[in-house]
Amino acid sequence: MTSPVYNAFLMDGTTRVGELEYTRLEIASRFLRMGRWEATVPRIPSTLSWKSRIQVTRDGVSVFSGPLRHISRKWTYAETDARTLIGTCDLAYVAAALAYPDPSLSGPPFSTQTHDVRTGPCETVVRDYIRLNVGPNAPANRQQGILLQTNLARGGTVTARARFDNLLDLCREKTLPSGIGFEVVDMTLRFFSTSNLTSFIIFSRELDNLKEYEYEARSPEFNFAMVAGGGEGTARVIVERLDQASINETGRIETFVDQRNTTVVSELEQSGDETLSERSAGDLNIHIIPGVQAVENMRAYDDYYLGDLVTAVIDGEVLESFIQEIGILVTQDDVHEHATLGSFGKGYRATRTNELLQAISRRTRNLEVR
């Protein structure tokens, strides 16, 4: 089987300006997180601007797109001459917005309602938050040009309360336990179902489909959540949520969740479950470079995708984990596709630090926007 053909195009909005000439192209698609791209180019295109975007196709099908965010140019007397374009994925337009308490308003005063409360299938709830805050039904001054696919109402029932939350953070938190994922490609919001492929996608040295791997494992951050709702002092509504399997394995590790924007017990329980969904199992990161057999029989995009549950046999231990990142490296000579399994991608340390800062910011904001 021949290697897939990747092409990159410079975009003005959703219009192709021309094919992007490059000597090296690297893209990383991440599950419910911001992806990135980086292209080493022989020259800076004359049409380039801060509104430029890139579109990457795989065998003619668009698999990644996103805005330009950084330009790097380096020249030295010793004949170093490098030009690099760096950007993010189109989820940047969601990450750049807040979820307003009343998204029909273009600005203050926000005196109509304290929160935008939505209950329903996960896909419907998340789609509506994006549709009303940055999509085609947002006020004109907030629209980002994001289009929508048909709502298929996938995922379990969730309840969300928006009050100036970061839009991507809010949607991600509600989506994580739902069995679906979402992305923005070609400025179109797309939802997809994740699959259990543990019996079909198996990476192992014994099967000769691993060229290289590295992994890190960390114990759970916490497995018991005390969730405090609205009220003050002894009048606060408090519920507890726990992951018993994790407690049995590592002992009880407690955390406090400030959810003072509601007193509804079911919503507090949901918030606790969302908090535990990523952290009670610990962190497992397996970065793999597929071998020859995997390239022939188990290909990213074709056979597995972000959020799918797959199997990796590492040092004789059978591990089942989710695809968190699909990375592509294209040079003038070859194409390399790789994947990261587990709870975080290759940029774990920076990502984790950012998430901790965001968590602190969210807890502070809960007080600020009361």
Image: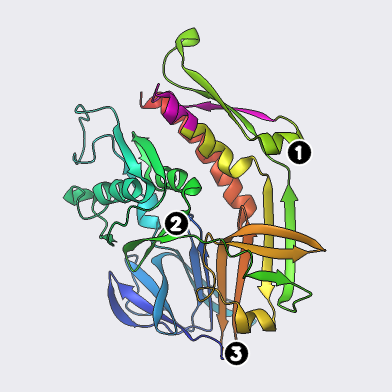
Residue 111: % across, % down: 20, 26
The residue wearing badge 3 is: 333
Q: Quadrant of the C terminus?
A: top left
Is residue 266 a member of the stretch shown in magenta?
yes
Residue 343: % across, % down: 61, 52
How busy is the neighbourhood of tag 2: few (under 14 within 10 Å), some, or many (20 plus)?
Answer: many
Q: Amino acid at mark 2?
A: Gly
The residue wearing badge 2 is: 181
Residue 336: % across, % down: 61, 79
Q: Amino acid at mark 1?
A: Glu
Give the residues in magenta. Answer: 253-269
65 over 235 or under it: above or below: below
Circle 1 — which element?
Answer: helix
The residue wearing badge 1 is: 249
Disc 3/disc 1 C-alpha distance (Å): 47 Å
Residue 283: % across, % down: 67, 48
